[in-house]
Image (cartoon, rainbow, N blue to C red):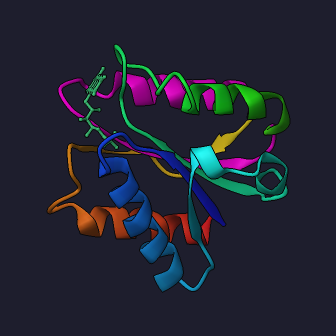
Amino acid sequence: MKIIYWSGTGNTEKMAELIKNGIVEAGKNAEVTSVSDVNVDELLKDEILVLGCSAMGDEVLEESEFDPFIDEISSKVSGKKVALFGSYGWGDGQWMRDFEERMIGYGCSIIDTPLIIQNEPDGNEQECLDFGKKIALA
Ligand SMILES: Cc1cc2nc3c(=O)[nH]c(=O)nc-3n(C[C@H](O)[C@H](O)[C@H](O)COP(=O)(O)O)c2cc1C
């Protein structure tokens, strides 16, 4: 499965790599791709999408690449299972609650509770690995 992410300073990217390791440990294939390199047609062949973006702006998804990507796939993801994750700084996770609600609105079902981690995933490695394992079993 494919893990698509946007990350400004590498925190969400680190989460993506750890989640990948969890998926692989659980026996499934996974690859991590920056949203700037995603092939949308290929991605949409998958039943499960793993999507990560940090909290940007004022509690929103990153607006120049990631948000337009979500808009682009919005009409084509109904029925898919999605797992959501991202790093944040000083907020309370509102950006991720909105992201989850948005994907549900597009007809997706959400795998587990979206995984949010404050700043770097240092000390939270196991949480990321476990999240990957749950995705692999979904
Ligand atoms: C322009 C900008 C806007 C941000 N807006 C928020 C925000 O609204 N809420 C929040 O909790 N953190 C916010 N942050 C903090 C980042 O989400 C946090 O530093 C995160 O760890 C960055 O992850 P990344 O390296 O994957 O981009 C913002 C950071 C930047 C640079």
Q: Identify which residue, 50 or 104, lies in the foreground.
A: 50
Considering depth in this image, is 130 or 71 the residue closer to the camera? 71
Q: Judge left or right: residue 89 versus residue 114.
A: left
Can residue 24 be seen here? The reply is yes
Q: Where is residue 26 in the image (x, y as percent from the top left)?
A: 51, 82
Whether residue 104 is visible here, answered yes or no, is no
Residue 107 left/right relative to 21: right
Q: Where is residue 22 in the image (x, y as percent from the top left)?
A: 44, 74
Tell me if 61 is positioned left or right of 11 in this view.
right
Q: Which of 80 and 67 is in front in this view?
A: 67
Kindly identify the residue that appears in the image at 67 percent across and 42 percent down: 109
Q: Which residue lies furthest to the left in this view?
A: 123
The image shows residue 66 at horizontal and vertical percentages of 56, 33
| The N terminus lies in quadrant | bottom right
Quadrant for ligand 1?
Answer: top left
Numbered-mark total:
0
Which residue does the image show at 29% across and 50% down from the upper left? 11
Residue located 27% across and 69% down the image: 126
Choose between 112 and 50: the one closer to the eye: 50
Which segment did they paint magenta?
78-106
Measured along the vertical axis of the image, is residue 20 above or below residue 53?
Answer: below
At 76% across and 35% down in the image, what residue appears?
73
> Where residue 15 sits: x, y (%)?
36, 57
Above/below status of 40 relative to 123: above
Q: In this view, does 48 lie above or below 91?
A: below
Identify the image quadrant of residue 53.
top left
Q: In which quarter of the image is the C terminus?
A: bottom right
| Image quadrant where residue 102 sits | top right
Residue 111 highlighted magenta (yes or no)? no
- In the rendered image, the vertical position of residue 11 relative to residue 71, given as above or below: below
